[in-house]
Amino acid sequence: MDNYMKLEIPGKSQNEAFARVTVAAFAAQADPTIDEISDVKTAVSEAVTNAIIHGYENGPGNICITASLTGRRLEITVVDYGVGIEDIEQARQPLFTSKPELERSGMGFTIMENFMDEFSVESKPGQGTTVRMVKIFDGPPERNKA
Amino acid sequence: MEAKLKMAGKTLVVRLEGELDHHVVDGLRSRIDEKITVGKAENVLFNFQAVDFMDSSGLGMVLGRYKAVKERGGQVLACSLRPAVYRVFELSGLFSRIPVYSSEQEALKHV
Ligand SMILES: Nc1ncnc2c1ncn2[C@@H]1O[C@H](COP(=O)(O)OP(=O)(O)O)[C@@H](O)[C@H]1O
Ligand SMILES: [Mg+2]
Protein backbone atom coordinates (compact mmCIF):
# COMPACT_ATOMS: atom_id res chain seq x y z
CA MET A 1 0.00 0.00 0.00
CA ASP A 2 1.43 3.37 -0.98
CA ASN A 3 0.20 6.53 0.60
CA TYR A 4 1.20 10.13 1.26
CA MET A 5 0.44 13.03 3.60
CA LYS A 6 1.44 16.65 3.92
CA LEU A 7 0.93 18.92 6.90
CA GLU A 8 1.72 22.60 7.27
CA ILE A 9 1.63 24.19 10.70
CA PRO A 10 2.84 27.41 12.29
CA GLY A 11 5.85 26.93 14.53
CA LYS A 12 4.01 27.00 17.84
CA SER A 13 4.98 24.65 20.63
CA GLN A 14 1.43 23.39 21.08
CA ASN A 15 1.72 21.93 17.55
CA GLU A 16 4.56 19.59 18.56
CA ALA A 17 2.18 17.00 19.98
CA PHE A 18 -0.24 17.47 17.07
CA ALA A 19 2.52 16.88 14.50
CA ARG A 20 3.91 13.70 16.05
CA VAL A 21 0.47 12.21 16.72
CA THR A 22 -0.62 12.97 13.14
CA VAL A 23 2.41 11.27 11.60
CA ALA A 24 1.98 8.31 13.98
CA ALA A 25 -1.69 7.98 12.98
CA PHE A 26 -0.72 8.04 9.31
CA ALA A 27 1.99 5.41 9.87
CA ALA A 28 -0.38 3.12 11.78
CA GLN A 29 -1.78 1.76 8.51
CA ALA A 30 1.55 -0.04 7.95
CA ASP A 31 1.11 -1.98 11.19
CA PRO A 32 4.18 -0.84 13.09
CA THR A 33 4.96 -2.30 16.50
CA ILE A 34 4.40 -0.15 19.57
CA ASP A 35 8.16 0.45 19.85
CA GLU A 36 8.45 1.43 16.19
CA ILE A 37 5.62 3.95 16.44
CA SER A 38 7.13 5.36 19.60
CA ASP A 39 10.47 5.86 17.79
CA VAL A 40 8.70 7.73 14.98
CA LYS A 41 6.83 9.97 17.42
CA THR A 42 10.03 10.86 19.25
CA ALA A 43 11.96 11.61 16.04
CA VAL A 44 9.18 13.83 14.63
CA SER A 45 8.93 15.66 17.93
CA GLU A 46 12.68 16.35 17.86
CA ALA A 47 12.64 17.69 14.29
CA VAL A 48 9.57 19.90 14.82
CA THR A 49 10.87 21.23 18.13
CA ASN A 50 14.19 22.12 16.47
CA ALA A 51 12.37 24.02 13.71
CA ILE A 52 10.49 26.04 16.35
CA ILE A 53 13.32 26.72 18.79
CA HIS A 54 16.32 26.94 16.48
CA GLY A 55 14.96 27.48 12.96
CA TYR A 56 12.50 30.21 13.91
CA GLU A 57 14.01 31.06 17.32
CA ASN A 58 10.52 30.91 18.82
CA GLY A 59 9.25 33.50 16.34
CA PRO A 60 6.71 33.14 13.50
CA GLY A 61 7.23 30.74 10.60
CA ASN A 62 5.65 27.67 9.10
CA ILE A 63 6.81 24.07 9.23
CA CYS A 64 6.02 21.56 6.47
CA ILE A 65 5.88 17.89 7.32
CA THR A 66 5.45 15.17 4.75
CA ALA A 67 5.23 11.44 5.23
CA SER A 68 5.02 8.74 2.61
CA LEU A 69 4.56 5.02 2.91
CA THR A 70 5.87 2.51 0.43
CA GLY A 71 4.87 -0.84 1.78
CA ARG A 72 6.23 -0.77 5.31
CA ARG A 73 8.84 1.90 4.60
CA LEU A 74 7.98 5.29 6.07
CA GLU A 75 9.80 8.39 4.83
CA ILE A 76 9.39 11.67 6.65
CA THR A 77 10.59 15.18 5.87
CA VAL A 78 10.40 18.15 8.23
CA VAL A 79 11.16 21.50 6.60
CA ASP A 80 11.54 24.99 8.00
CA TYR A 81 12.53 28.26 6.30
CA GLY A 82 14.38 29.65 9.29
CA VAL A 83 17.97 30.57 10.15
CA GLY A 84 19.57 27.34 8.91
CA ILE A 85 22.67 25.60 10.26
CA GLU A 86 26.25 26.81 9.61
CA ASP A 87 28.07 23.66 10.65
CA ILE A 88 25.96 20.52 10.31
CA GLU A 89 28.79 18.23 11.39
CA GLN A 90 29.07 20.04 14.69
CA ALA A 91 25.30 20.28 15.16
CA ARG A 92 24.99 16.50 14.86
CA GLN A 93 27.47 15.78 17.67
CA PRO A 94 25.83 14.26 20.75
CA LEU A 95 25.35 16.90 23.48
CA PHE A 96 26.09 19.83 21.14
CA THR A 97 23.62 22.66 21.56
CA SER A 98 23.80 26.30 20.49
CA LYS A 99 21.23 27.20 23.17
CA PRO A 100 22.50 25.88 26.51
CA GLU A 101 20.77 28.81 28.25
CA LEU A 102 17.43 27.23 27.29
CA GLU A 103 18.47 23.96 28.98
CA ARG A 104 18.63 22.12 25.68
CA SER A 105 20.21 18.69 26.05
CA GLY A 106 21.85 18.60 22.60
CA MET A 107 20.48 15.09 22.06
CA GLY A 108 17.84 15.78 19.40
CA PHE A 109 19.85 14.82 16.32
CA THR A 110 21.37 11.84 18.16
CA ILE A 111 17.89 10.57 19.01
CA MET A 112 16.67 11.00 15.40
CA GLU A 113 19.73 9.19 14.11
CA ASN A 114 19.41 6.28 16.54
CA PHE A 115 15.65 5.83 16.53
CA MET A 116 15.29 5.91 12.74
CA ASP A 117 16.86 3.73 10.03
CA GLU A 118 18.01 6.60 7.84
CA PHE A 119 18.61 10.21 8.76
CA SER A 120 19.99 13.22 6.89
CA VAL A 121 20.06 17.00 7.32
CA GLU A 122 20.30 19.61 4.62
CA SER A 123 20.57 23.25 5.52
CA LYS A 124 21.51 26.63 4.13
CA PRO A 125 22.24 29.49 6.51
CA GLY A 126 19.51 32.11 6.13
CA GLN A 127 17.29 29.79 4.08
CA GLY A 128 16.22 26.92 6.25
CA THR A 129 16.62 23.30 7.16
CA THR A 130 15.28 19.98 5.87
CA VAL A 131 15.44 16.83 7.94
CA ARG A 132 14.74 13.58 6.14
CA MET A 133 14.18 10.33 8.01
CA VAL A 134 13.22 6.78 7.10
CA LYS A 135 11.79 4.07 9.32
CA ILE A 136 11.34 0.55 8.09
CA PHE A 137 8.69 -1.34 9.99
CA ASP A 138 10.14 -4.81 10.13
CA GLY A 139 8.71 -5.93 13.47
CA PRO A 140 5.76 -8.36 13.53
CA PRO A 141 2.54 -6.50 12.67
CA GLU A 142 0.54 -5.84 15.85
CA ARG A 143 -2.63 -7.31 14.41
CA ASN A 144 -0.95 -10.66 13.75
CA LYS A 145 0.24 -11.04 17.30
CA ALA A 146 -1.43 -13.63 19.48
CA MET B 1 0.85 17.06 30.99
CA GLU B 2 -0.23 16.96 34.57
CA ALA B 3 2.26 17.03 37.40
CA LYS B 4 1.57 16.57 41.08
CA LEU B 5 4.23 17.90 43.39
CA LYS B 6 4.47 16.86 47.03
CA MET B 7 7.13 16.72 49.71
CA ALA B 8 8.25 13.46 51.29
CA GLY B 9 10.58 14.63 54.02
CA LYS B 10 13.26 16.70 52.28
CA THR B 11 12.54 15.15 48.89
CA LEU B 12 10.26 16.72 46.33
CA VAL B 13 8.27 13.99 44.57
CA VAL B 14 7.17 14.98 41.05
CA ARG B 15 4.48 12.66 39.73
CA LEU B 16 4.40 13.28 35.98
CA GLU B 17 1.45 12.34 33.84
CA GLY B 18 1.12 12.40 30.04
CA GLU B 19 3.65 13.63 27.48
CA LEU B 20 6.86 15.43 28.43
CA ASP B 21 7.93 17.67 25.54
CA HIS B 22 9.19 21.23 24.89
CA HIS B 23 5.66 22.64 25.13
CA VAL B 24 5.21 21.59 28.76
CA VAL B 25 8.71 21.73 30.25
CA ASP B 26 8.87 25.50 30.83
CA GLY B 27 5.88 25.58 33.17
CA LEU B 28 7.03 22.47 34.96
CA ARG B 29 10.57 23.75 35.38
CA SER B 30 9.47 26.88 37.24
CA ARG B 31 7.12 24.93 39.52
CA ILE B 32 9.94 22.57 40.50
CA ASP B 33 12.54 25.32 40.87
CA GLU B 34 10.26 27.20 43.23
CA LYS B 35 10.18 24.14 45.49
CA ILE B 36 13.97 23.91 45.36
CA THR B 37 14.72 27.58 46.03
CA VAL B 38 11.78 28.75 48.14
CA GLY B 39 10.49 25.41 49.44
CA LYS B 40 13.94 24.12 50.39
CA ALA B 41 13.53 20.73 48.75
CA GLU B 42 16.92 18.99 48.93
CA ASN B 43 16.30 16.12 46.54
CA VAL B 44 13.97 15.62 43.60
CA LEU B 45 12.36 12.31 42.66
CA PHE B 46 10.73 12.12 39.22
CA ASN B 47 8.03 9.45 39.06
CA PHE B 48 7.54 8.52 35.38
CA GLN B 49 4.88 5.87 35.94
CA ALA B 50 2.22 7.74 33.95
CA VAL B 51 4.51 9.20 31.26
CA ASP B 52 4.09 7.58 27.87
CA PHE B 53 6.23 10.03 25.89
CA MET B 54 9.41 11.99 26.54
CA ASP B 55 11.80 13.62 24.07
CA SER B 56 15.11 15.48 24.48
CA SER B 57 13.33 18.56 25.85
CA GLY B 58 12.18 16.45 28.79
CA LEU B 59 15.71 15.20 29.11
CA GLY B 60 17.03 18.79 29.23
CA MET B 61 14.55 19.63 32.00
CA VAL B 62 15.58 16.59 34.09
CA LEU B 63 19.30 17.29 33.57
CA GLY B 64 18.82 20.95 34.48
CA ARG B 65 17.22 19.95 37.79
CA TYR B 66 20.06 17.47 38.35
CA LYS B 67 22.58 20.29 38.07
CA ALA B 68 20.60 22.69 40.28
CA VAL B 69 20.05 20.08 42.99
CA LYS B 70 23.61 18.76 42.90
CA GLU B 71 25.01 22.26 43.41
CA ARG B 72 23.11 22.36 46.69
CA GLY B 73 24.37 18.96 47.78
CA GLY B 74 21.19 17.00 46.99
CA GLN B 75 20.35 14.31 44.48
CA VAL B 76 17.91 13.64 41.65
CA LEU B 77 16.30 10.22 41.38
CA ALA B 78 13.80 8.66 38.99
CA CYS B 79 11.42 5.75 39.19
CA SER B 80 8.93 3.67 37.25
CA LEU B 81 10.23 4.25 33.70
CA ARG B 82 8.09 2.86 30.89
CA PRO B 83 9.87 1.53 27.77
CA ALA B 84 9.67 4.73 25.66
CA VAL B 85 11.16 6.84 28.45
CA TYR B 86 13.70 4.16 29.32
CA ARG B 87 15.13 4.23 25.78
CA VAL B 88 15.64 8.00 25.82
CA PHE B 89 17.36 7.73 29.23
CA GLU B 90 19.55 4.91 27.95
CA LEU B 91 20.64 6.63 24.75
CA SER B 92 21.61 9.81 26.55
CA GLY B 93 23.61 8.11 29.28
CA LEU B 94 21.39 9.47 32.06
CA PHE B 95 21.61 6.25 34.08
CA SER B 96 25.17 7.08 35.10
CA ARG B 97 24.01 10.27 36.80
CA ILE B 98 20.48 9.56 37.92
CA PRO B 99 19.68 6.39 39.87
CA VAL B 100 16.47 4.73 38.72
CA TYR B 101 14.22 2.60 40.93
CA SER B 102 11.23 0.39 40.30
CA SER B 103 8.84 2.37 42.50
CA GLU B 104 8.49 5.62 44.43
CA GLN B 105 8.67 3.71 47.70
CA GLU B 106 11.88 1.99 46.67
CA ALA B 107 13.46 5.27 45.53
CA LEU B 108 12.58 7.05 48.77
CA LYS B 109 14.59 4.46 50.72
CA HIS B 110 17.70 5.82 49.00
CA VAL B 111 17.56 9.51 49.87
N1 LIG C 1 15.87 23.37 12.26
C1 LIG C 1 17.01 23.92 12.72
N2 LIG C 1 17.37 25.18 12.35
C2 LIG C 1 18.51 25.76 12.81
N3 LIG C 1 19.39 25.14 13.64
C3 LIG C 1 19.10 23.87 14.02
C4 LIG C 1 17.91 23.21 13.59
N4 LIG C 1 17.92 21.97 14.13
C5 LIG C 1 19.04 21.87 14.86
N5 LIG C 1 19.77 23.01 14.80
C6 LIG C 1 21.08 23.25 15.45
O1 LIG C 1 21.64 21.99 15.82
C7 LIG C 1 21.89 21.96 17.23
C8 LIG C 1 21.70 20.55 17.76
O2 LIG C 1 20.32 20.17 17.70
P1 LIG C 1 19.79 19.05 18.71
O3 LIG C 1 20.69 17.86 18.62
O4 LIG C 1 18.34 18.82 18.47
O5 LIG C 1 20.03 19.70 20.16
P2 LIG C 1 19.22 20.85 20.93
O6 LIG C 1 17.89 21.05 20.27
O7 LIG C 1 19.07 20.31 22.32
O8 LIG C 1 20.08 22.08 20.88
C9 LIG C 1 20.98 23.00 17.82
O9 LIG C 1 21.46 23.50 19.07
C10 LIG C 1 20.98 24.07 16.72
O10 LIG C 1 22.14 24.88 16.81
MG1 LIG D 1 16.71 19.58 19.52
Image (cartoon, rainbow, N blue to C red):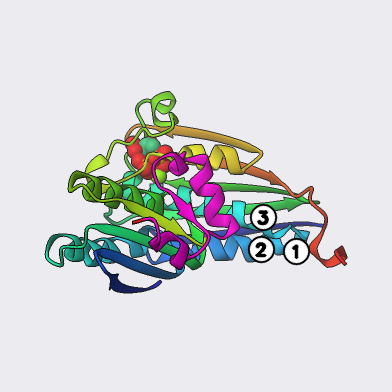
Q: Are marks 1 and 3 in contact (CB under 8 Å)?
A: no
Q: Which element carries disc 3, helix, strand or loop?
A: helix
The chain identifier of the residue carrying mark 1 reads A
In the rendered image, the quadrant that contains the N terminus of chain B is bottom left
Q: What residue does disc 1 label?
A: A29
Residue B69 in the image, given as x and y percentages of width and height:
23, 51
Q: Give the class, few, some or many, for how many residues have Cα within 10 Å of label 3's Cα (few <14, many ≥20).
A: some
Residue B85 in the image, given as x and y percentages of width and height:
52, 55
Q: What residue does disc 3 label?
A: A35
Does B40 appear in magenta? no
Report the span colored magenta.
Answer: B81-110
First along the sequence among labels 1 and 3:
1
In the rendered image, the quadrant that contains the C terminus of chain B is bottom left
Residue A103 in the image, given as x and y percentages of width and height:
28, 47
Q: What residue does disc 2 label?
A: A26
For disc 3, does the CB lie below 8 Å from ligand 1?
no
Residue closer to the observer: A22 or A107: A107
Residue type at numbered disc 1: Gln
Residue type at numbered disc 2: Phe
Residue type at numbered disc 3: Asp
Residue closer to the observer: A21 or A101: A101
Q: Give the class, few, some or many, for how many residues have Cα within 10 Å of label 1's Cα (few <14, many ≥20).
A: few
The chain identifier of the residue carrying mark 3 reads A
Determine if residue B6 is in view. yes
Label 1 to label 3: alpha-carbon separation: 15 Å
Of all residues, the one furthest to the left in this rendering is B38
Q: Which element carries disc 2, helix, strand or loop?
A: helix
Q: Find ligand 1 in the image and state its quadrant.
A: top left
Q: Are marks 2 and 3 on the same chain?
A: yes
